[in-house]
Amino acid sequence: MTHTFTIAIDGPAGAGKGTLARRLSDHYRLNLLDTGLTYRAVAHKLLELGLPLDNVSAAETAARQVNLSNLDRAVLSAHAVGEAASKVAVIPTVRRILVEKQRAFAKAPPGAVLDGRDIGTVVCPDADIKLYVTASAAVRAMRRLAEIESMGGSADFATILADIERRDERDMGRADSPLKPAADAHLLDTSEMAIEAAFLAAMAIVDNALAKRNKA
């Protein structure tokens, strides 16, 4: 790829967008950013300092200090950090600070795959490809339960489902950058689709866009 190329992937938690983003970034040799980790990094810092999650000035300071090239997924993937991140993400100034960082990341050669909640609508509205990856809440809850059990843990399906539905409502209902598909996004419903099938479908969309661009 001789030009910067951006793939924006949006969707709710557990739909498979993170795995799809990793597969696409590897295949097309693009940089990868899970934008959710940037909000988790802010939340983690506030939790670490014992500060309230609605402390706007502290959250803004933490957001400015986030290093996109040094996001520790192992630490930031903790459930408590994810819950806290959903609360930090509703602070408009924190979103603006992080969105600027995310845009700069997307513009760096050779391009990037960004996954999150508002990539195609807010962060990279001019992305070359926009994908909206979704699945039913029940399917996403089953996947989360299977993931927990595969790591030797145990959990209650109803609790996970309620948690996912609550998070969806928070993400889709917030006033600033709500979760929704961009008007020109390609919809991928993975409710009955394995990751390999989703990857092949996404790859066909990207290859088609690349072919058109190379002809231009």
Image (spheres, rainbow, N blue to C red):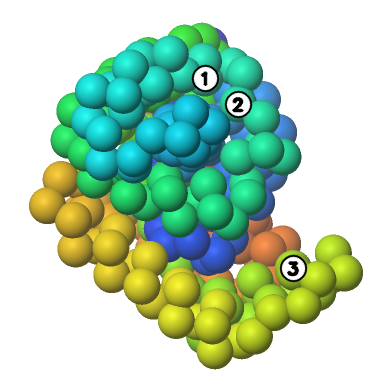
**Along the viewing direction, whichever of 3 and 33 lies nearer the viewer:** 33
Percent across and percent down for residue 89 are 31, 43
Percent across and percent down for residue 215 are 42, 26
Percent across and percent down for residue 155 are 69, 79
Mark positioned earlier in the residue sequence (3 or 1): 1
- The alpha-carbon separation of the residues under discs 2 and 3 comes to 22 Å
Q: Residue at x 37, y 22 (%)?
A: 63
Local SS, label 1: loop
Residue count near mark 3 (Cα–Cα under 10 Å), binned few <14, some 14–19, many ≥20: few
Residue count near mark 1 (Cα–Cα under 10 Å), binned few <14, some 14–19, many ≥20: some
Q: Which mark is residue 71?
A: 2
Residue closest to the far bottom: 158
Instruction: Name the amino acid type tagged 2.
Output: Leu
**Along the viewing direction, whichever of 73 and 46 lies nearer the viewer:** 46
Asked if labels 3 and 2 touch by Cβ distance under 8 angstroms, the answer is no
Q: Which mark is residue 68?
A: 1
Residue 209, relative to residue 183: is it above or below? Answer: above
> Label 3, on which residue?
147
Instruction: Name the amino acid type tagged 1.
Output: Leu
Looking at the image, residue 173 sits to the left or right of residue 89; the answer is left
